[in-house]
Image (cartoon, rainbow, N blue to C red):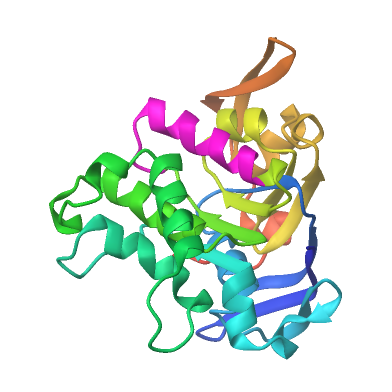
Amino acid sequence: MTLSARGLTVTLGGRPILDGIDLSVPAGAVTGLIGPNGAGKTTLLRALASVLSIAAGVITLDERPLADWPRRDRARIIAYLPQGAPCFWPVDVRRIVALGRLPHLAPWRPPAAADEAAIEDALVATDVLHLALRNVLTLSGGERARVMLARALAVRPRVLLADEPVAGLDPEHQLLVMALLREQAAEGVAVVVTLHDLTLAARFCDRLVALDHGRIAAEGPPEAVLTSPILASVFAVRAEHGHRGGQSFVIPWDVVPRLNVVEKGGIGRDRRD
């Protein structure tokens, strides 16, 4: 399924945060949203997930306005993992992950075999099966992050929107999570992930969308977006580029002067991003 936005504009507190975004998220690919703090990445993801009102434009799923889809159908198709998704309930990990199956359950019906299989698969995929009976509030921040990702995967969505899913994870689990997102894409899921780690973005994303001041500054395959001019303009950094095993990589190395908002013609940044 293809999730698209046309002319997407979002205003928060009277300030424009996104301005006329045109974006198409294809199935079977990992699309990375990158950009500096406040560029609008989280706002864009929340708008695509229908948890944020838009001021103008339209979001479509398979060319049908997302607002026209029944809410239950949207919940079965689109899984949204918020940045730093909180856990407030002192319940075990398996019950948290099982919440991902709610859109598929008939009222007052217990989980079926297919639901239990989806829960088990999600626990295994995110490396939290051994924590299944642990109180979620006793876990480390990185462990909780993987549990919340498991809850999103338990939906078995066709579109997965993940906001900074590797933030706070150790290097091993950063690589495992990014590889897992690629596996989801290989199974036909449209994956959108926000990232600050440009090295991971270059290695694991099929295409990148660079946001700056609420607008798309560049988009395309990683090698076309993570160029020296774009990195200097959008991120105010110089980077080292290289290749290993047929894959390119980029490592931010030092800082260059940033153009101010007036010179770049930008709009206000979303400080919650």
In the rendered structure, which segment of residues is drawn in magenta? 167-184
Q: Name which residue lies at 63% across and 45% down.
A: 184
Residue sitting nearer the eye, 58 or 216? 58
For this view, does 99 lie left or right of residue 134? right
Q: Can residue 258 be seen here?
A: no
Quick one: quadrant of the N terminus?
bottom right
Q: Position of residue 236 (x, y in %)?
A: 60, 37
For this view, does 120 lie left or right of residue 195? left
Q: Name which residue lies at 51% across and 77% down.
A: 103
Residue sitting nearer the eye, 150 or 66? 150
Q: Position of residue 141 (x, y in %)?
A: 25, 47
Residue 88 sits in quarter: bottom left
For this view, does 192 lie left or right of residue 172? right
Q: Name which residue lies at 78% across and 29% down.
A: 223
User: Which residue ends up furthest to the front in the rendered image?
Assistant: 113
Q: Position of residue 58 (x, y in %)?
A: 78, 81
Q: Position of residue 106 (x, y in %)?
A: 48, 84
Task: Please check the rendered image and state whether residue 168 is part of the magenta-colored stretch, yes or no.
Answer: yes
Q: Can residue 147 be seen here?
A: yes
